[in-house]
Amino acid sequence: MEHPVIRAVEPSEVQRAISLQVMAFDADPVMRWLWPEPYEYLTHFPRFLRGFGGGAFEGRTAHVTDDFLGGSLWLPPGVGPDEGALTELLEDFVPEPARSDAFGILEEIGELHPLEPHWHLAFIGVDPTRRGKGTGAALLRHALARIDELGAYCYLESSNPANLSLYERHGFELVREVQVGTSPCVFPMIRVPR
């Protein structure tokens, strides 16, 4: 298990941090369901990432390992996805029936967020060359230590069932599975204050 140095993403490094997430999500069940063709994925996933988790860059709650092989985007209480940008992206670049199903997923997971102020883990990803070496766990521990000091709730939606055990080891509990039409399952999870 490695112990990488973790720090906030600098404004000049946003594109580099986005590129890391593009690599990390290249085989993600939900993202590749939305854009199964590589060109479409590479073109549209960065916009999705900015729309869903871009608030982490502005709030300096986007973190990376010093070598840029792992990173996370946390939305602090009161900061959410850019619904207008997501709507435009899905309407323009996701064909039916996936488009309607994706809107259904967003609606359902929107209703599952904790009512209490909470930190939302919008994205966490590790370069494929670094998987299984503790980088994701280190990123979680880094953010959760601060969040625990604040006594706050956390929330995430896992788009890959392979990651559920990692989140469970860090105190997240599955709310329920969300699946709409042709979509893969999405797994909303909550972590109560520690």
Image (cartoon, rainbow, N blue to C red):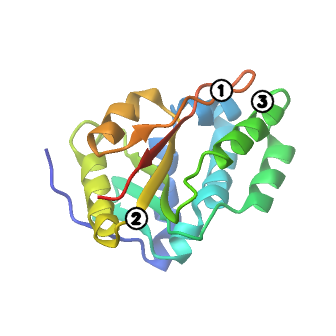
The residue lying toward the viewer, choosing from 179 and 1, is 179
The quarter of the picture where residue 66 lies is bottom left
Spot occupied by residue 64 in the image (x, y as percentages of width and height): 35, 62
The quarter of the picture where residue 178 lies is top right
User: What kind of element bears circle 3?
Assistant: helix
Above or below for 35 versus 44: above
Above or below for 135 versus 50: above
Tell me: 81 left or right of 138: right
Q: Quadrant of the N terminus?
A: top left
- The dot on residue 38 is none
- The dot on residue 179 is 1
Q: Is residue 67 visible?
A: no
Disc 2 marks a residue whose amino acid type is Ala
- The dot on residue 98 is 3
Above or below for 99 versus 68: above
User: What kind of element bears circle 2?
Assistant: loop
**Separation of disc 2 and disc 1 at Cα?**
28 Å
Give whichever of discs 2 and 1 has the lower sequence position.
Answer: 2
Image point (53%, 62%), residue name: 116
The residue lying toward the viewer, choosing from 28 and 158, is 158
Image point (53%, 65%), residue name: 15
Say few, some or many: other residues with alpha carbon within 10 Å of mark 3 (under 14 / 14 to 19 / 20 or more).
some
Image point (67%, 47%), residue name: 111
- The dot on residue 152 is 2
Spot occupied by residue 187 in the image (x, y as percentages of width and height): 52, 34
